[in-house]
Amino acid sequence: MKIEAVTLRELHMPLVHFFETSFGRVYDRRTMLVTVHCDGVDGWGECVADAHPFYNEEFVDSAWLVLRQYLIPALLGKTLATGADCVPLLEKVRGNRMAKGALENALWEAECKQKAVPLWKLIGGSAREIPTGVSIGIQDSVDQLMGKIETELAAGYQRIKVKVKHGWDVDVLAKIRSRWPDILLSCDANSAYRLDEIDHLRKFDQFNLLMIEQPLWNDDIYYHARLQKQLQTKICLDESIRTVRDAEMALKLDACRIINIKVGRVGGMSEAIKIHDIAKTHSVPVWCGGMLESGIGRVHNIHLSSLENFTLPGDVSASQRYWKEDIVEPEVTVSARGTIQVPNVPGTGYQIKDDLIEHLTVRKETLRA
Ligand code: OSB
Ligand code: MG
């Protein structure tokens, strides 16, 4: 694959419903797409960085800059045998994993199209369909949240995850559990708590949660290990796991008993696969997280989730939960059993809607070799 040119795009996509986490509420998504043009084949990747550096350090504008000034120039004109071969060429740039991941995933897509194999096969997956859940943000009222949970359960989703923060946690979980005693339920704090709140966090144990996701600092592993010793509920790390070394440290310290893998957060498919593999050797299950992706990132998440240790339902839900119209066709749909089919055709199994993408694009730049 000769990398002849790379196109960057920023899209503005209004969300069907606002999404609120412990770090704030969003009504729309500023997202970034990367297209690699290689020997007549285009591969697409989505940069999952947020509009603001609140989930982690990256944001759309920083990713745009680092891609155009450093990452894309490091690849232009190069001939690579595989998508994964870009990783050492991008290594000189520290961090900026969401920016790197968009580029790497675009190259994996170009590779699977060129080789005419399904993406899941190229990455070593096996599952024909994947179990899915939903992540439900903080709402204006508990009644509104209960209504949403009802809708998602009726749609078939296998696991409900709710966002928690101070003032929206124990009482809310108690209400959910009293109405639905047996559903798979988890919560995500996005780093809202501190270690001195251990007595408060121990109250979560009464709800038989599948996990509590990222209760403490976004960059911490050690104190999560201290917390895990005092909680019955399994800790799942999201923000803290940026590399396979982070995952190894967390597993060895017993800082988490479940890992959320986001392909963008860890810098692309190669690192995501390594984290999947190391968790498997520790018998720790993983699941695929989401970042309110458009169809392009969502489709990569679906293929990634076909690896065998993705045994828990992911945050990979149907397009229509997020967008009035998604930028891929067919849109991502979920069966009444809460599963998504992994397309078994060459490439990703989804087509890009060029006209809609053009319509949603607010910024575009092509860099050529
Ligand atoms: O922590 O998993 C998270 C969305 C934005 C930033 C962080 C997170 C999330 C989600 C949404 O939980 C998952 C999704 O539905 O895409
Ligand atoms: Mg999370």
Image (cartoon, grey):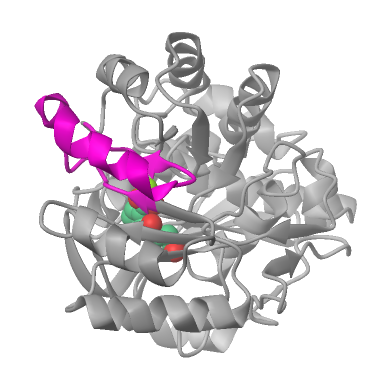
Q: Specify the segment rendered in magenta.
A: 187-216
Q: Quadrant of residue 333?
A: bottom right
Can residue 14 be seen here? The reply is no
Tell me if 197 is positioned left or right of 255 in this view. left
Residue 238 picture location, percent across and down: 40, 38
Residue 11 lies, with reference to residue 348, above or below; the image says below
For the residue pair 346 and 303, the one nearer the viewer reads as 303
60 vs 155, left or right, is left
- Does any portion of residue 115 appear in the rendered image? yes
The picture places residue 344, in percent across and down from the top left corner, at 88, 62
Indicate the position of residue 341 as horizontal and vertical percent values: 78, 67
Q: Where 233 falls versus 4 (above or below)?
A: above
Q: Residue at x 27, y 83 (%)?
A: 144
Dividing the image into four equal quarters, which quarter contains ligand 1?
Answer: bottom left
Q: Quadrant of residue 22?
A: bottom left
Residue 191 in magenta stretch? yes
Q: Which residue shows up at 54% across the image and 60% down it?
A: 182
Q: Which of the image's four quarters has the N terminus?
A: top right
Please name whichever residue, 48 or 245, is drawn nearer the observer in this view of the structure: 245
Q: Does the magenta segment cover residue 257? A: no
From the viewer's perspective, tell me whether residue 38 is left or right of residue 238.
Answer: right
